[in-house]
Image (cartoon, rainbow, N blue to C red):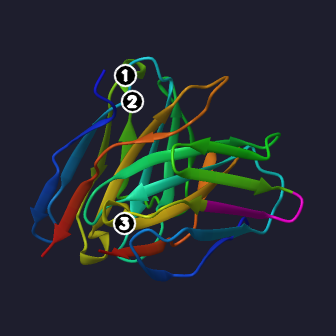
Amino acid sequence: KQEVTQIPAALSVPEGENLVLNCSFTDSAIYNLQWFRQDPGKGLTSLLLIQSSQREQTSGRLNASLDKSSGRSTLYIAASQPGDSATYLCAVRVGNQFYFGTGTSLTVIP
Amino acid sequence: DTGVSQDPRHKITKRGQNVTFRCDPISEHNRLYWYRQTLGQGPEFLTYFQNEAQLEKSRLLSDRFSAERPKGSFSTLEIQRTEQGDSAMYLCASSFYRGNTEAFFGQGTRLTVV
């Protein structure tokens, strides 16, 4: 069974810092990997999708990389802002299912 | 299109009652998923539809749970004889079948069983 791990579980940084969130998965036979943002009590907002054949994707201040062979992905957030405070989840798609990590709770301090 | 819509947003019910949730996916999407999320955990897969066909069900989906997607449009998730352990956020997502299979999630239905 696919296991997805996210490190760290929580992260607190001052505004303006660049930061990296990590995601690892045990089975490299994935179709794609997706990063989501979740605000407290809300649903998931899609941030970036990386297909299994891709190495990275960028959207604004966000950059996600994928190393399928080693089972790792990183989400890089540049110049963090207080509005970036949320839980960030990664999910890998295997067959018709998405397997999620437990998330990294990010707090950006003004 | 405003994205995936779920109704209701919140539901409080007494143990033993039946509840039904509705999900309206993005209109062009033929794949629809239900997930359940408990506090501090990532979402867990419940079931998946391609058009009107329910193709996969998780072992988490006990016989008290049933999902339908008539005509391949909206979907409903019913929980019969609710238990306190059913308290969770129920999330619906949709995606295309081919090409860009990015999944889009709704805002979820928060169920509290008292």
Q: Which residue is mark 3?
A: A86
Quadrant of image for the C terminus of chain B: bottom left
Q: Residue A55's spot in the image, x, y percent?
A: 79, 47
Instruction: Find out whether the residues at labels 1 and 2 contact each other: C-beta distance under 8 Å.
Output: yes
Q: In the image, what residue type sits under mark 3?
A: Ala
Marks 3 and 2 sit apart, C-alpha to C-alpha, by 32 Å
Mark 3, Cα crowd under 10 Å, few <14 / some 14-19 / many 20+, is: some
Q: Quadrant of residue B18?
A: bottom left
| Residue at the spot 39% in from the left edge and 18% down from the top edge | B71
Q: Which residue is mark 1?
A: B73
Q: Which residue is mark 2?
A: B69
Which of labels 3 and 2 is toward the front? 3
Which numbered circle lies on residue B85? none
In terms of secondary structure, where does tag 2 sit? loop
Q: Is residue A86 above or below residue B30?
A: below
Write down the chain letter for disc 2. Answer: B
Q: In the image, what residue type sits under mark 1?
A: Ser
